[in-house]
Amino acid sequence: MKILITGFDAFGGEKINPSTEALKNIRKNILDCEVITTTLPTVFNESFEKIKEEITKHDPKIVICVGQAGGRKNITVERVAINIDDARIADNKNNQPVDEIIRDDGENAYFSTLPIKAIIENLNENNIPAEISNSAGTFVCNHIMYQTLYLANKNNNNFNAGFIHIPYLPEQTVNNNLPSMSLDTIVSALENIIETSIKFYGKNDLKINAGKEH
Ligand code: PCA
């Protein structure tokens, strides 16, 4: 079985993107599965063109997209992607869509098909702070999660997919007082997430409460 895991290039004035830094360091064979990594451009439609090419080429059974969520302190496992682009800042090709529907023939939203509860439980058991997030925002990360789940949906869900947001690396927070997580911890988290996704492939997620009031 193949797993595709993607990161993004740096955006919004940052010199690096922690997702790409982490993917350089993750194990490429986990539980006898081949782990394929790639970096996507932080650009609305192009990011999807690239991931679609990779999915067509490798036929992965699990697709995990990873991106930076500057200011969040935990690993956040996204529950849902919504059918809207609304960019506060321009992407890396100067696109700044406002309130644009991603797919006219798509659902309003798609839920992650990764075992999000099991992922959180396994991360926390390994002393890695992690929680569910109920919004991936409305920028390129939500866009890629939506587009990837749309693609899976149109193909009879022949692969599982979802999105993980990760905090800044320490070097990105030297002057801004924002939370960060070490590269080693992020790398272990992503390896752990891949393991859980493989173990739960074809099975139901755990039913444990990870809800929030707001
Ligand atoms: N984070 C952005 C896009 C690329 C990335 O790493 C986001 O959260 O939308």
Image (spheres, rainbow, N blue to C red):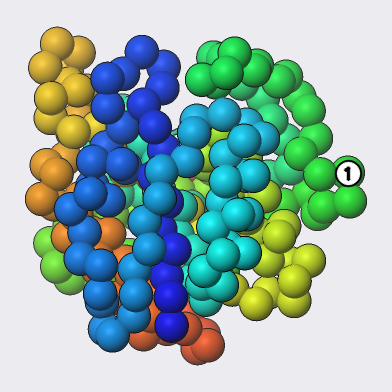
Residue at image coords 50%, 88%: 203
Q: Could you tell me residue 105's position as x and y percent? A: 89, 51
Residue 69, visible in the rendered structure: no
Q: Is mark 1 within 8 Å of ligand 1?
A: no
Is residue 133 visible from the viewing direction of this image? yes
Mark 1, residues whose alpha carbon is within 10 Å: few (<14), some, or many (≥20)? Answer: few
User: Hey, which quadrant is residue 28 in on the image?
Assistant: bottom left
State whether residue 187 is above or below residue 58: above
Disc 1: which residue: 104
Check disc 1 and give the amino acid type.
Asp
| Residue 152 percent across, percent down from the top left | 68, 66
* Residue 16 sits in quarter: top left
Instruction: Give how far across and how far down residue 57 sits, in percent.
Output: 56, 65
Displayed quadrant of residue 191? bottom left
In the image, residue 70 lies at what x, y percent?
Answer: 33, 28
Q: Quadrant of the N terminus?
A: bottom left
Up the image or down, 102 lies above or below 116; here it is above
Q: At 24% across and 32% down in the image, what residue appears?
A: 168
What residue appears at the point 20 percent right and 66 percent down from the top-left corner? 27
Residue 51 relative to residue 126: left or right = right
Foreground of the two, 102 or 82: 102
Figure quadrant, ligand 1: top left
Mark count? 1
Residue furthest to the right in view is: 105
Classify residue 26 as left or right of residue 46: left
Q: Residue at x 52, y 69 (%)?
A: 58
What kind of element bears circle 1?
loop
Left or right position of 142 against 86: left
Residue sitting farthest toward the bottom: 203
